[in-house]
Amino acid sequence: MSQLPPVEKFSTQGGVKIYRLPMMVFPGFIGYSYLLLNAGVPTLVDCGSGIGDSNDHLLAGIQAVADTFGEKIGLKDIQHILITHGHIDHFGGTAFMMEQTGAKVGIHELDRRVLTAYEERVIMATKDLRVYLERAGMSHEERKSMMDMYGFAKKNISSITVDFSLDEDVFFEGMQFVHVPGHCPGQVAIIIDEVMLSADHILSRTTPHQAPESITHYTGLGHYKDSLRKIEKIDGIELALGGHEDPIYNFYERVREIRASHERKLNRVFDIIKDAGHPVTIREVTRLMYPDKSGYDTLLALEEAGAHIEYLYQHGLISVANLHQVEDEDNPALQYVTT
């Protein structure tokens, strides 16, 4: 089992104290919440997944801020909870933390319904994913396995109230919100002086996961690449703190690395389709790109490959070869060739 790293403290040039609180958000997968002091009222950014020991880890992290760093902070002092985006490893513990703190909750409007109409969102997202898996060329047995895994982590969460939106046109308690869709529709980065809380938009080692816009609006590689260009134009970022992995001290270089990684993936997908010698499905491309994936990682790989195929299709570099089948059947697997 992975061991949690210690709580870490970061300070901005303007005197804001940022405490990084580790949690095991999924088995073997560490995520971070951030406790902000001296940025208006005490504020918690993200709440982990609420799965397993995630809530206990978050409470222990807040207690460590008091015990280890001498801050006079308790749960009831936290007045705002900001959710960077609507993925369960960032918002799943929100209802629990609302009960513990009584804090008001904010999220970007494009992810608001994930929190306020969670049950509806799960049904709609499940339907869209099922359609995608059919179009990707998954067998009935594979689709059932994927859908079972997709639905497992989404149990035991219910809708909650959202009190305000994270509007990028408004400065809030000394914070600037930057809407950076792609990885998630309502993903925001939070700028505090020279520090950016980059959530899952920029990570230190991993190229953040992409899913096709055909599953969820405002995701997709096109939106993500636009967001990379947008955030790269912001001057003065000396440190980025992500929702996972390590602090990023070479922020602008890391943005360029992520962009280059996606260009390599696009070239790889194009070459696979070009060299296949016959029309290929998303499932076939995924097997060649990620031959060793299994379990839930297979679903992530299908989404990642599909996002890059979608981008190539949107930009006219590949086309659908089985148009007659698409016209005649309800939802056949799409077969791609290079244009």
Image (cartoon, rainbow, N blue to C red):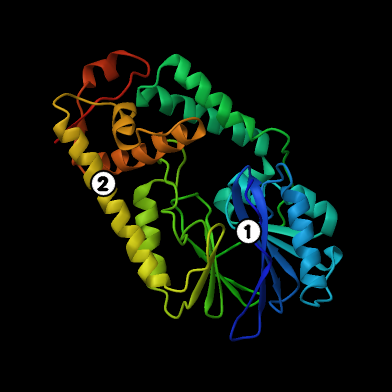
Q: Residues within 10 Å of mark 2 (few under 14, many from 20)?
A: some
Identify which amino acid the numbered label 2 is placed on: Leu
| Residue labelled with disc 2 | 266
Q: Going by the image, does 72 lie left or right of 136?
A: right
- Position above or below: 271 against 15: above
Residue 60 in the image: x percent, y percent? 78, 59
Residue 189 in the image: x percent, y percent? 53, 64
| Residue labelled with disc 1 | 32
Residue 112 visible from this viewpoint: no
- Residues at marks 1 and 2, CA–CA distance in whole angstroms: 30 Å
Dividing the picture into quadrants, the one containing residue 235 is bottom left
Residue beneath the point at 43% across and 71% down: 251
Q: Earlier in the sequence, mark 1 or mark 2?
A: 1
- Position above or below: 118 against 16: above
- Position above or below: 137 against 222: above
Quadrant where the N terminus is found in the figure: top right
Q: Secondary structure at mark 1?
A: strand
Residue beneath the point at 83% across and 59% down: 101
Identify which amino acid the numbered label 1 is placed on: Tyr
Front-lying residue, 296 or 330: 296
Residue beneath the point at 64% across and 35% down: 153
